[in-house]
């Protein structure tokens, strides 16, 4: 019987070495050690053995069983490793091929700039105000201290719908509308982004473009506050090392009025092609709100003062992205838009 | 305004270069647009005398000249044939770049080195009148007295720089050299030295004419009219210095009289006009034109005048259109011996309107339009007298000065305290006093309060802040510190609507659509097609006819963009726009129109080719999928209904989009009959009302708990008539399944063998689940059978096992 056990055992061990699949391995295990397995069958026969033989045979069987189980485990681990290696050898991909693409659309550069400007001013506690694009002569001009026949009206070539209704030439009418709405509450602290229209079309002008207007009205607002807010804005928008300078200018609705230049973001002020050698770039117009405009808004210019500013979004986009022709922004060529 | 630096230097001390002065003026609020150096290109061009001319030994057509250029004698090889020994000519030395851009280098011509080049008129961009007559045949030949070695630019009086001022409408005073000089003086702390006639209220004493009266009939439009009578007029060209200054200012010299009037206008800012006194019959009237009255202008054109045009006339006929142009009948000619020189105020509005209408603009009309100083009329005539006598052009004999109205002299107060408050910088009284001194304004000061007399030429200063601006300008804006507003902290945030607009834009971009921005105006025909012709608002003065109306739909703009891209071989287009449409309720508009924000999308082509996936066509389902994505993101229960109006859209591939039973837009393929017109094939579009979306947008999310009991899934395939909408089948299923049927999804649509042509197979996956217990198989089977039977009955559906 001992021999029989050994024979079964040795045969199983031999067979084990040749098996190359986990399933076959399992089958063999069942065939030898399972309920109906050959070794199990032998064990059943142990009842016919004498009491002194039983422990000896039992030991032989157990030894053989543990040898077999160990061999199985080893072979199984061997096979796992083999399979793993085989899998790794075959599962090689070209990681340089492009990935499955999720198509993303692009935001128009003008929207991106508007949002950036909005976020900066929201951070400084401004609200966003809006107004109609088709405006009355009153809001677009008269309430802004530009009576009919004022020569400054010629600075802007307007699109008219009737004699009294036109496409707004600036976002400034939102100043008046906001003051009218909020008065007598203080402070007024808004920016007003939006589309504006002027009868003009060349590389630096588009008949439709975007402006962002700003207005702060409160008691004790100073020109130096305007300078502080705009310096803060310029640094966030164009870089921490930017400086600003104010130059006297003229707008009918502000007095004093100032153009605001920022130090050139390309050369840092040394002078280059972008800033035409001056080191400065004109980015916005600003000033202290004219007393007449404060009054038109419903406030008393003896009690409150304010500042206002306005900037052209396309111009900023052109500066920021190095765009040479404003018309590209409204041509909407996908090759252009998909850069942003 | 073109300002000659040479001229300016006569009126004020300038110790800055042209470029520095330009910077000073610009930083002071008078923007200098450009500085033009008149001598540019002449830097290394000198007067040379030809010492000898010999034939080139190896070239028949070349001459070798020895040229005395002052310091030395150089060799210049030339092909010019109009030269003689002893001629004085412009010699461009090695290293010069001529006004026409030509660079001069040392060059070897057939073995002989040439150290420069002789110049012609063309190379120096000079008028042909310069130089001797022989010059026309080649090289410019200068008069024999031209000094050898001198710079040609200097010799021709070109050593000047022109500052081109870009004036803001509030500073028309700087259209006068005298006032520019004052401005320079204020900004640099110098004193101007102006002709006495530029001072406040000079007096010109001449007898009043006995035979001439000025009659102002329109006192509103003409506040003052002064006339100077000049006799013994002798018309000749004006002197060289005057011509040079006029040319520098951009004015063409004509003769001594015209040049004197123009010169005085440039200097004093007051336009002048000279009439032939002998052609004036009777008195001078300033009146409105009679209806259809005719005047022949100096250019010989007969012009019919409108009744409100302000004119100058004698007793018989019009002589001039006030401030705009003179008439041919009273023109000064070389035979003129007596003059009437007009120096008047005319209303800026009137002159602007008339010059617009006649299409005539001049230095004079420009000054009237911007507004002139009526106080300066007679003073300017004083300066005219001075120059007429100086030039010997005639003898001023009489002056008539008719005054109807002069603006009051203004006093404006300025408080030191208020100045500090507005500017945010502490200023001492002495500093403000210094500013007023520099401006040369008169003032009285008491306890920090100034009472300032405003000169008549500064009509822009009317209230205190105007003076505060003067202070800021003169102390320099750099003096103003940077501070932040003092009030309470305010919070900045977008309104819900602003935020939704932004999120919607983001969601569309993340869905793979590119954002575009198109013009708010479009072609009337295109807008009528997609929008509402009845509501579209025409512009009175469009930029171009095809941008003639305000859009009532975003679609034409998107179609234009798509067509343009496809034409440029950007064949796959998936774009959207969020923008206003404009709805006029009546024509013409009496009140502001409704501005309706919309969101529209367009797709044509397909997703790009990719090695992993087949390209997906941009079709109805592509855009519908994007809208469904939005619906999920924003909690919008959009539903799609078969549309009634289908002339613009493919009748079989289009839907009206509904939200809470309200139609808010459409989604669909463009009607094939429009494809040719737009140059696009198989283009799908949607356009939705933004406000409706915003109104229904989910504001807050209420979380539901996740079911604890397992779900049981059943698949069900049925064959129904082809025209049966899948959505109808699904709604019926939901109804039949009740609340235990948690979800129905369609996972397959099949047409073709073995299913008959007029039918289709739809396969659904149904998920049954209870929130309270575990469902049994039996229960679900029963329910599923009920669903199936219901469908079979309702849609004559067959069960596909
Ligand atoms: Zn630069």
Image: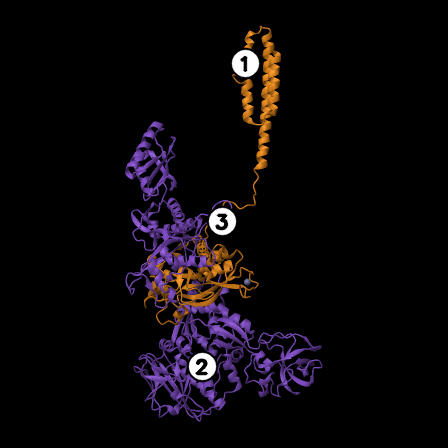
Chain colours: A orange, B purple
Give the number of the disc on residue A189: none
Name the residue nearer the viewer: A38 or B91. Answer: A38
Chain identifier of the residue bearing label 1 in the image: A
Q: Are marks 2 and 3 in contact (CB under 8 Å)?
A: no
Marks 1 and 2, how far apart at CA: 132 Å
Name the residue nearer the viewer: A205 or B738. Answer: B738
Chain identifier of the residue bearing label 3 in the image: B
Direction from residue B91 to residue B336 in the image, left or right: left
Assess disc 3: are there few (<14), some (14-19) or many (≥20) residues with their C-alpha within 10 Å of its C-alpha: few
Direction from residue A71 to residue A99 in the image, left or right: left
Q: Which numbered mark, 1 or 2, is in the foreground of this view?
A: 1
Ligand 1 shown in quarter: bottom right
Percent position (x, y) of residue B271?
A: 42, 81
Answer whether residue B646 is visible to the viewer in this image: yes
Cβ of disc 1 within 8 Å of ligand 1?
no
Question: Quadrant of the rendered structure where residue B337 is?
Answer: bottom left
Badge 2 marks a residue whose secondary structure is: helix
Residue picked out by circle 2: B265
Q: Which numbered mark, 2 or 3, is in the foreground of this view?
A: 3
Give the number of the disc on residue A41: 1
Cβ of disc 3 within 8 Å of ligand 1?
no
Chain identifier of the residue bearing label 2 in the image: B
Direction from residue A240 to residue B301 in the image, left or right: left
Residue picked out by circle 3: B609
Answer whether residue B776 is visible to the viewer in this image: no
Percent position (x, y) of residue B513?
A: 43, 51
Marks 3 and 1, how far apart at CA: 66 Å
Q: In the rendered view, would you say B92 is above or below B751?
A: below
Rendered residue at 47%/61% (across/down) = A328
Q: Are marks 3 and 1 in contact (CB under 8 Å)?
A: no
Badge 3 marks a residue whose secondary structure is: loop
Rendered residue at 56%/64% (across/down) = A272
């Amino acid at each position: 019987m001992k021999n029989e056990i050994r024979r079964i055992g040795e045969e199983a061990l031999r067979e084990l070495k040749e098996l190359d699949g986990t399933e076959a391995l399992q089958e063999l295990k069942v065939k030898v050690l399972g309920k109906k397995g050959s070794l199990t069958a032998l064990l059943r026969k142990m009842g016919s053995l004498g009491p002194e033989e039983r422990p000896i045979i039992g030991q032989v069987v157990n030894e053989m069983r543990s040898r077999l189980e160990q061999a199985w485990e080893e072979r199984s681990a061997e096979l796992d490793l083999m399979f793993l290696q085989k899998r790794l050898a075959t599962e090689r991909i070209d990681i340089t091929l492009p990935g499955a693409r999720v198509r993303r659309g692009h935001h128009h550069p003008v929207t991106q700039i508007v949002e950036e400007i909005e976020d900066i001013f929201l951070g400084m506690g401004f609200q966003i105000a809006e107004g109609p694009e088709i405006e009355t002569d009153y809001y677009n001009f008269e309430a802004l201290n530009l009576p009919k026949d004022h020569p400054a009206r010629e600075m802007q070539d307007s699109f008219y719908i009737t004699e009294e209704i036109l496409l707004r030439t600036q976002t400034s009418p939102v100043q008046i509308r906001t003051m009218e709405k909020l008065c007598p509450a203080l402070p007024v602290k808004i920016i007003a982004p939006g589309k504006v229209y002027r009868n003009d079309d060349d590389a630096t002008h588009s008949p439709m473009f975007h402006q962002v207007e700003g207005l702060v009205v409160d008691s004790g607002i100073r020109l130096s506050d305007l300078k502080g807010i705009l310096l803060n804005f310029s640094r966030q928008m164009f870089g921490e090392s930017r400086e600003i300078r104010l130059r006297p200018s003229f707008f009918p609705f502000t007095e004093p009025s100032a153009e605001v230049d920022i130090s050139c973001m390309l050369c840092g002020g040394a002078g280059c092609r972008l800033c035409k050698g001056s080191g400065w770039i004109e980015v916005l117009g600003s000033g202290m709100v004219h007393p007449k405009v404060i009054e038109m808004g419903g406030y008393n210019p003896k009690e409150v003062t304010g500042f206002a500013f306005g900037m052209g979004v396309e111009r900023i986009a052109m500066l920021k992205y190095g765009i040479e022709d404003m018309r590209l922004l409204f041509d909407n060529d996908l090759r252009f838009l998909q850069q942003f | 305004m073109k300002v000659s630096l040479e001229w300016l230097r006569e009126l004020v001390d300038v110790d800055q270069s042209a470029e520095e002065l330009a910077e000073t003026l610009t930083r002071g609020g008078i923007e200098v647009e450009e500085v033009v150096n008149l001598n540019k290109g002449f830097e290394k061009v000198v007067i040379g005398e030809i010492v000898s001319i010999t034939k080139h030994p190896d070239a028949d057509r070349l001459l070798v000249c020895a040229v005395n250029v002052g310091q030395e004698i150089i060799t210049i090889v030339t092909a010019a044939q109009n030269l003689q020994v002893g001629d004085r000519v412009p010699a461009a030395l090695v290293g010069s770049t001529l006004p026409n851009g030509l660079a001069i280098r040392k060059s070897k011509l057939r073995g002989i080195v040439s150290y420069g080049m002789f110049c012609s008129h063309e190379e120096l961009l000079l008028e042909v009148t310069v130089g001797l007559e022989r010059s026309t045949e080649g090289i410019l030949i200068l008069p024999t007295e031209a000094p050898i070695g001198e710079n040609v630019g200097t010799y021709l009086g070109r050593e000047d720089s022109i500052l081109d001022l870009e004036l803001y409408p509030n500073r028309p005073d700087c259209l006068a050299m005298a006032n520019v000089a004052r401005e320079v003086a204020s900004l640099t702390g110098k004193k101007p030295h102006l002709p006495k006639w530029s001072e406040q209220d000079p007096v010109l004493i001449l007898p009043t004419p006995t035979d001439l009266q000025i009659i102002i009939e329109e006192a509103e439009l003409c506040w003052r009219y002064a006339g100077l009578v000049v006799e013994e007029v002798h018309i000749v060209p004006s002197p060289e210095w005057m011509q040079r200054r006029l040319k520098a200012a951009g004015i063409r010299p004509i003769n001594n009289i015209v040049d004197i009037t123009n010169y005085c206008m440039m200097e004093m800012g007051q336009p002048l006009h000279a009439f032939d006194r002998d052609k004036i019959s009777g008195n001078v009237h300033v009146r409105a034109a009679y209806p259809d009255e005719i005047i022949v202008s100096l250019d010989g054109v007969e012009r019919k005048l409108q009744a409100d045009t302000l004119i100058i006339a004698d007793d018989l006929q019009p002589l001039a259109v006030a401030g705009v142009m003179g008439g041919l009948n009273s023109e000064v000619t070389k035979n003129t011996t007596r003059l009437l020189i007009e120096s008047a105020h005319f209303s800026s509005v009137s002159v602007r309107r008339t010059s617009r209408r006649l299409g005539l603009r001049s230095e004079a009309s420009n000054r009237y339009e911007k507004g002139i100083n009526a106080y300066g009329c007679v003073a300017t005539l004083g300066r005219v007298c001075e120059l007429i006598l100086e030039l010997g052009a005639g003898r001023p004999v009489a002056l008539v000065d008719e005054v109807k109205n002069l603006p009051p002299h203004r006093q404006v107060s300025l408080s030191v305290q208020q100045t500090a408050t507005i500017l945010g910088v502490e200023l001492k009284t002495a500093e403000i006093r210094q500013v007023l001194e520099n401006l040369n304004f008169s003032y009285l000061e008491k306890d920090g309060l100034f009472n300032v007399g405003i000169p008549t030429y500064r009509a822009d200063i009317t209230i205190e802040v105007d003076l505060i601006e003067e202070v800021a300008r003169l102390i320099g804006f750099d003096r103003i510190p940077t501070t932040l507003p003092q009030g309470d902290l305010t919070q900045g945030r977008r309104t819900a609507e602003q935020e939704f607009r932004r999120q919607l834009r983001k969601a569309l971009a993340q869905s793979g659509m590119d954002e575009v921005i198109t013009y708010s105006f479009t072609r009337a025909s295109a807008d009528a097609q997609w929008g509402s012709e009845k509501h579209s608002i025409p512009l009175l003065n469009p930029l171009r006819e095809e941008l003639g109306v305000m859009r009532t739909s975003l679609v034409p703009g998107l179609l234009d963009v798509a067509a343009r891209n496809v034409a440029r071989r950007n064949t796959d287009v998936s774009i959207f726009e969020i923008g206003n449409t404009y709805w006029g309720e009546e024509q013409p508009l009496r009140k502001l129109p409704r501005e309706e924000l919309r969101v529209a999308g367009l797709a044509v082509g397909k997703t790009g080719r990719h090695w992993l996936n087949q390209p997906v066509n941009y079709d109805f389902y592509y855009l519908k999928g994007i809208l469904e994505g939005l619906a999920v993101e924003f909690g919008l229960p959009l539903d799609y209904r078969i549309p009634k109006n289908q002339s613009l859209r493919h009748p079989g591939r289009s839907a009206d989009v509904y939200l809470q039973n309200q139609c808010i837009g459409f989604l669909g393929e463009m009607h094939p009959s429009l494809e040719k017109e737009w140059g696009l094939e198989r283009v799908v579009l949607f356009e939705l009302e933004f406000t409706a979306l915003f109104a229904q947008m989910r504001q807050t999310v209420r979380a539901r708990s996740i079911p604890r009991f397992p779900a049981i899934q059943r698949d069900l395939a049925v064959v129904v008539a082809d025209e049966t909408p899948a959505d109808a089948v699904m709604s019926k299923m939901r109804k039949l399944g009740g609340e235990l049927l948690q979800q129905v999804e369609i996972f397959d649509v099949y047409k073709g063998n073995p299913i008959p042509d007029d039918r289709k197979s739809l396969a659904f996956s149904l998920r049954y689940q209870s929130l309270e217990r575990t469902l049994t198989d039996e229960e679900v089977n029963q329910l599923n059978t009920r669903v199936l039977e219901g469908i079979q009955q309702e849609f004559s559906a067959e069960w596909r096992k």
